[in-house]
C-alpha cells in the first residue's frame, strides 16, 4: 500500500476514534405521556404557549442540548386539561378569547443536568425549573409561581449518555405534571382567586 | 489427588452460596380474597434520594409469581393508567393517604377498570461492600495472564408491603435479607466465583409472595 494511502487511512482512523470519544449529546424527547386522571374544576383558563416555549431547546452546558419544546407542550397541555374544565391554548396573551378566566403563561427558567462524571454518583439527573405567570383575563397579576421538576435514572449501567439524559428528562417532565396537578390549587393567591370568584371546590378532590 | 481437587471445588462452590432469610408478618389469619378477574400490581418505591428499587428486581419477583392463580399487572402500565398519582412525588406512603386517593372517583374507577385488587410495594436495594484483595492482569509478547485474588460482599434487603385496594387495609409484610461473598481468582485466567445474592433474594421473595396469595392457611 502506498505511503499516502496509509497516512489517509491512519488520519481517518484517528478522527473516527476521536469522534467516538466525544461526549457531546443532543437529546430529543420522543416519549409519549399518559393522560392525567383528574377531575377538572369548573374554571376557564387560557394557556399561553409561546413559540419560544413550543420549540425550546435547553443547553444546560456546552456539550449537551435537550429538545424539550414539543414534549413539554404536550405534557403541560395534558396536565392543564386535568385542572380546568374549559381551556384554550393560544400562542400569545392577546389571542385569549375567554372572559373571567385565568391566563397562564409557562416558561422555562433553567435546565440543569448532572452526569456520573460530575457527581461521582451512579445516576444521571435533570432539573427543569418552570415559572408560571398567572393573570386574570383582565390582565391583573395573580401570581408568578416557581415550579421545579426533577428526574433521575435508576442507575447508569449500560446507558449511553444521550439515552440516560432523555430518560431523566422524561421523568422530570412527568414530575412537572405531577407537581402541577398536586399543587396548583394550593397556591394561596390562586386559592383566593377561586374563592373570590365563588367557584365551588370539590370536597373529594385529592390534596 | 482427584479427591483433593473435588473437595477444593466443593468448598469453593459452597462458599458462593448466599444466606437468605425471609420474615413474614400477617395481622390476621384471613385468607387472601381474590377472584380470577382481579390482579395485583408490584410497585417499586422510588422516593428515596440515594437509591431506587430497581425495575429489574420487580420484574424478577413478578416472574417468580407466575404459576399462581393470580394475575400480575405490569408496573409501568399501572403507573401510566393512574398518572400522576403514583409518581415518586405523589405515591401514597401510608394507608391514610391511599384512602384519601381512593375517595377520588376518577382514581377509584381506573383501579377497578384495571381489576387491581392488591398493591405490593417493594422497597430496598442491593449493595456491594467489604471489597478486598487485588488482581492484576498483564500481556506481553510471550503471552499474558492475571494474578491475584479479590473478594467483595453483597447484600440485598427488600421489604414487601401488601395493601388491599378494596378494603384499604394492610394485609401483610414480607422482608428478605440475603447476603454472600463473591470471589475473583487470578490464576493465569481470571476465574469468577459469583454469589447470586440478588437472584436469591428475588427467588425467595417471589416464592414467599406466591404462597402468601395462594395458601389457604397462612404459615
Image (cartoon, rainbow, N blue to C red):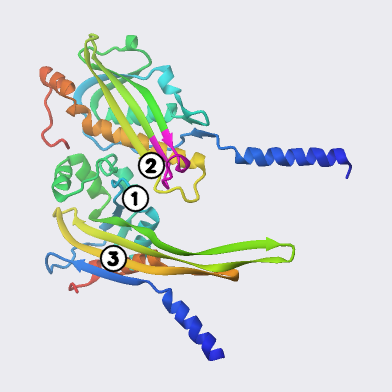
Q: Nearer the viewer, residue B110 or B145?
A: B145
- What label sits on residue A79 in the rendered view? none
- What label sits on residue A152 in the rendered view? 2
Q: Quadrant of residue A20?
A: top right
In the figure, B171 relative to B100: above or below?
below
- The residue range painted magenta reads A113-126
Q: Nearer the viewer, residue B41 or B45?
A: B45
Badge 3, how many Cα within 10 Å: few under 14, some, many 20+?
many
Q: Secondary structure at mark 3?
A: strand
- What label sits on residue B176 in the rendered view? 3
The reply to whether discs 2 and 1 touch (Cβ–Cβ < 8 Å) is yes
Q: Is residue B60 left or right of residue A67?
A: left
Q: CA distance from mark 2 to mark 1?
A: 10 Å
Q: CA distance from mark 3 to mark 1?
A: 17 Å
Q: Is residue A43 left or right of residue A113?
A: left
Residues tagged by mark 2 and mark 3 found on one chain of the structure: no
Amino acid at each position: 500500500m502506498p505511503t499516502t494511502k496509509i497516512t489517509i487511512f491512519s488520519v481517518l482512523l484517528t478522527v473516527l476514534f476521536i469522534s467516538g470519544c466525544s461526549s457531546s449529546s443532543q437529546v430529543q424527547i420522543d416519549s409519549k405521556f399518559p393522560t392525567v386522571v383528574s377531575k377538572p374544576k369548573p374554571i376557564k383558563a387560557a394557556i399561553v404557549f409561546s413559540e419560544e416555549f413550543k420549540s425550546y431547546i435547553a443547553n444546560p452546558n456546552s456539550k449537551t442540548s435537550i429538545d424539550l419544546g414539543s414534549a413539554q407542550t404536550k405534557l403541560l397541555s395534558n396536565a392543564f386539561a386535568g385542572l380546568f374544565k374549559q381551556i384554550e391554548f393560544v400562542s400569545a396573551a392577546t389571542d385569549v378569547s375567554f372572559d373571567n378566566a385565568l391566563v397562564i403563561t409557562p416558561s422555562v427558567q433553567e435546565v440543569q443536568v448532572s452526569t456520573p462524571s460530575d457527581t461521582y454518583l451512579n445516576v444521571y439527573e435533570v432539573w427543569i425549573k418552570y415559572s408560571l405567570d398567572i393573570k386574570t383575563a383582565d390582565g391583573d397579576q395573580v401570581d408568578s409561581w416557581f415550579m421545579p421538576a426533577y428526574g433521575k435514572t435508576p442507575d447508569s449501567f449500560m446507558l449511553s449518555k444521550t439515552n440516560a439524559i432523555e430518560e431523566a428528562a422524561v421523568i422530570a417532565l412527568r414530575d412537572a405534571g405531577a407537581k402541577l396537578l398536586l399543587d396548583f390549587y394550593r397556591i394561596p393567591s390562586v386559592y383566593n382567586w377561586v374563592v373570590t370568584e365563588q367557584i365551588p371546590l370539590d370536597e373529594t378532590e385529592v390534596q | 489427588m482427584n479427591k483433593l481437587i473435588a473437595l477444593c471445588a466443593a468448598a469453593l462452590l459452597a462458599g458462593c452460596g448466599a444466606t437468605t432469610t425471609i420474615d413474614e408478618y400477617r395481622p390476621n389469619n384471613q385468607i387472601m380474597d381474590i377472584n380470577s378477574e382481579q390482579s395485583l400490581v408490584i410497585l417499586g418505591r422510588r422516593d428515596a434520594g440515594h437509591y431506587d428499587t430497581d425495575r429489574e428486581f420487580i420484574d424478577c419477583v413478578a416472574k417468580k409469581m407466575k404459576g399462581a392463580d393470580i394475575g400480575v399487572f405490569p408496573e409501568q402500565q399501572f403507573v401510566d393508567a393512574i398518572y400522576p398519582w403514583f409518581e415518586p412525588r405523589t405515591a401514597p406512603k401510608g394507608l391514610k393517604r391511599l384512602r384519601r386517593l381512593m375517595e377520588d372517583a376518577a382514581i377509584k374507577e381506573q383501579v377497578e377498570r384495571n381489576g387491581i385488587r392488591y398493591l405490593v410495594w417493594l422497597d430496598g436495594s442491593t449493595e456491594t461492600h467489604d471489597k478486598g484483595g487485588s488482581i492484576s492482569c498483564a500481556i506481553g509478547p510471550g503471552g499474558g495472564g492475571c494474578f491475584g485474588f479479590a473478594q467483595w460482599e453483597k447484600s440485598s434487603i427488600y421489604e414487601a408491603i401488601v395493601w388491599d385496594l378494596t378494603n384499604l387495609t394492610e394485609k401483610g409484610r414480607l422482608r428478605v435479607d440475603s447476603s454472600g461473598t463473591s470471589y475473583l481468582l487470578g490464576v493465569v485466567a481470571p476465574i469468577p466465583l459469583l454469589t447470586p445474592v440478588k437472584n436469591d433474594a428475588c427467588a425467595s421473595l417471589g416464592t414467599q409472595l406466591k404462597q402468601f396469595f395462594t395458601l389457604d392457611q397462612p404459615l
